[in-house]
Image (spheres, coloured by chain):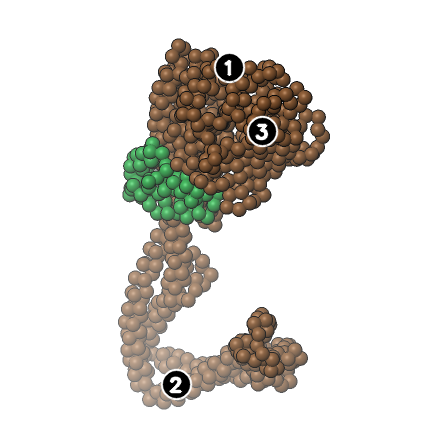
Chain colours: A brown, B green
Amino acid sequence: MTQVRLLGWKAAGLRCPDHEISLARTDGRPHHVSLVQMPNGTGKTTTLELLRAAFSGPGAWVDPDAVTEFAPRGSVGGRGAFEVRLLVDDRRFTIEMGLDFENRRAEFRTTWTSSVPRFQRPPSLLRVLTPEFAPFFVFDGELAHALLDPRKTRAREALEVQFQLSSLNQFRKLMDRYWDDKTRNSTTKGDKGLTQRRNKLNELSQRRDRLTVEKAELTKRLAVQKAKRDKLEAEYKAHFDQDSQAQEERKRLDEELKRASGNLGTLLANALTDARKPQNLSPRFTAGLQALRDNLDKLKLPESAAKEFFDELAHDTHCVCGEEMTDDRRGAILARRDSYLGKEDMGVLNAIKGAIKDTAGDQPSSYREAFDKQLARLRDAVRERDLVQGELDALEKRRLEGGDAELSAMKARLEELNGALAKDAARLATIDADDDSGHGEDTESLKALAKKIKRAGDLVAEATETRDIRLKTTILKKLITGAVAEATNRIAKQLVDATNARLESILTRSPLRVADVRDSVVLDGQSRGSPGQTLALGYAFLLGLFDAGQVSLPFIVDSPTGALDKNVRREIAELLPSISQQLVAFTTSSEYEQFVPVLDRAARGDVQYLTMFRLNDATQPLLAGVEPDAVRLSANGVLITSKSFFEGFDSEAYGEKPTTRAA
Amino acid sequence: MTRVNENVVAALKAAATDAGQPKEVAQRLVSWLDALATGNADLADVSEAANRIGDLLDQVKLPVTDLDLEALLGDEA
């Protein structure tokens, strides 16, 4: 359990008298009980509110007008300062709160591991040093009433903060944020998207499987048909050659066709190669390339020095100029080396310049002129091939018209086979194509399909991961909701039992019982209690809350017995020291009877007695006879650290000689 | 020993069991609460929270069948 102790506070320039209070004993640890007696009108409520505001942080100052309410009466502008010193698990934590009355602004500075100009709390106190929780340990009668008010949720808030249920609720919000962050770039978030993607992947995979089978069948059929066609073609030629004159002519034309086709193939390959060179397509391209080379020369690119040179130089003991290589010089060289090209960059630039000179360095129009001549030769070669093919077709036609029925039948069969072969080859080419040929998702290219299946698979994986995160965060959030409800029930039941047990011992004459703790404390058989019962209930409830919580806090209370009758006061006095390991109570002298002496006994004498009042003509005589060591004077107030003075002080006889009271 | 209240620990364990989740899920949540109580975690640290949630999600088991999922999450499945 994190231990938090209040060591003291200091106020200056505020509505209460300037003062500094130390709650520590000589061993540096705070007293178990500190009683601060202040007459009405001395700033008791102001001091308590300042403590509550300091523990609450900037969130307590949403209304700027609230700042001016702490300004000294009658003052205009100026600044006030309030400082709280704490021990958190034996480490000092200081909260400084500056109030700028002119600009109606509150400023914070905190010191934990270091001093920072903001309200930076130790992480273990993040939940309790808040405007919502501070009223539970800087307590007044209003909170006791709020605990019972069914329109308010103070009891549940206290329970959620003290037992970390608010952190669990915060986890749920963080999970929503996690989901948003994880799926921000996801193209689908719902189950519908996942189903659509799975269907798409299935459809593409099925098509791939079908096409793979079809390709195997086509390949096999093509091989069979090709063999059949080749055999038939050989038979057709043999039958054709039975006419010896036709045979000679065919052989001559076949030779011619072979040569013409070979020539055409060579010219075509060369033309296609040269068509890829820009200088052959237009003189403007050639001129542009030459201008690029000239400009590189003008810019002296690449340079004579590469950045690798500077790398090596930086690691030398001396610079090329002979000076010793210092760290500063080395740093400067390394910082500027990237302004120079690397060896690889220089090689590329030199290669570009050389290639332009070698292949496009002459008159720009000359390359296009040479290419035009090449194209003319290509056209001639096409024409020659077509002429020979035409002669061959005419020879075949004459031979077929000669009335050889068998040859005609063979020719028809051969054409039929070639047609089927061409059809299958075209289909195979479609299946073997490198890209989707513009068919997009409907492609029948296996290579294109493989890419699309990979992409579809990635999308399914993304949607699946997204779905899993959504389901898992939903399971976790539901689990946490159930756990919070269950923990609330368990804790509430324990709190109810503990509160009732304490109420039984406090309110012996006017019993009050708690039935449940929901948003507020629900009474058993009645909707409200008397002011005394309500205050007693508040103490009993908070005692249970602090007993079981994760942070042990000081309990600071204003007028602890307030409206309680004398009998109940004794019970409260016996109860209060056990509510917290440190109790700081602001009292008036009217609360002394039936309370302070009992409290002193209950706290085994570890009680600090402080009396504070404004210093003026009326109160000056009160200092007479007080041991000087027990008096702390400020510009407008006085603090007396004497038990006997505390006991004798009668705020109602303010300015009169204190009277002594018996315990 | 954890600083988390025993009722909270018990409720988390019970909720994990009811949801058919391994005990590690409840343990991770308790550890997170404990780290917050001791100042070793900060809910404002988004990156740290994301790491803890990622770790938690790794422990969560999804029901095998859609029917089981629907039984667990109802309309949220």
Instruction: Say what secondary structure mark 2 lies in.
Output: helix
The percent coordinates of residue A110 (x first, y second) are 55, 41
Labels 2, 3: front one? 3
Tell me the distance, in whole angstroms, between the alpha carbons under discs 2 and 1: 142 Å
A303 vs A477: above or below: below
Question: Which residue in the protein does label 1 denote?
Answer: A661
Q: Amino acid at mark 3?
A: Pro
Are callouts 2 and 3 both on one chain? yes
Question: Which residue in the protein does label 2 denote?
Answer: A254
Instruction: Say what secondary structure mark 1 lies in.
Output: loop
Q: Residues within 10 Å of mark 2 (few under 14, many from 20)?
A: some
Decide which of tag 2 and tag 1 comes sooner along the chain. 2
- Residue A537, picture quadrant: top left
Decide which of tag 2 and tag 3 comes sooner along the chain. 2
A98 vs A285: above or below: above
The percent coordinates of residue A593 (x first, y second) are 48, 15
Tell me the distance, in whole angstroms, between the alpha carbons under discs 2 and 3: 136 Å
Q: Amino acid at mark 1?
A: Arg
Q: Which mark is residue A628?
A: 3
Residue A197 visible to the viewer = no
Labels 2, 1: front one? 1
Q: Nearer the viewer, residue A181 or A138?
A: A138
Badge 3 sits on which subunit? A
Residue A322 vs residue A597: left or right?
right
Q: Amino acid at mark 2?
A: Asp
Residue at coordinates 67% horizontally, 79% vertically from top-left? A298
Are callouts 1 and 3 both on one chain? yes
Q: Which mark is residue A490?
A: none
- Tell me the quarter of the image containing the N terminus of chain A: top left
Q: Nearer the viewer, residue A35 or A512?
A: A35
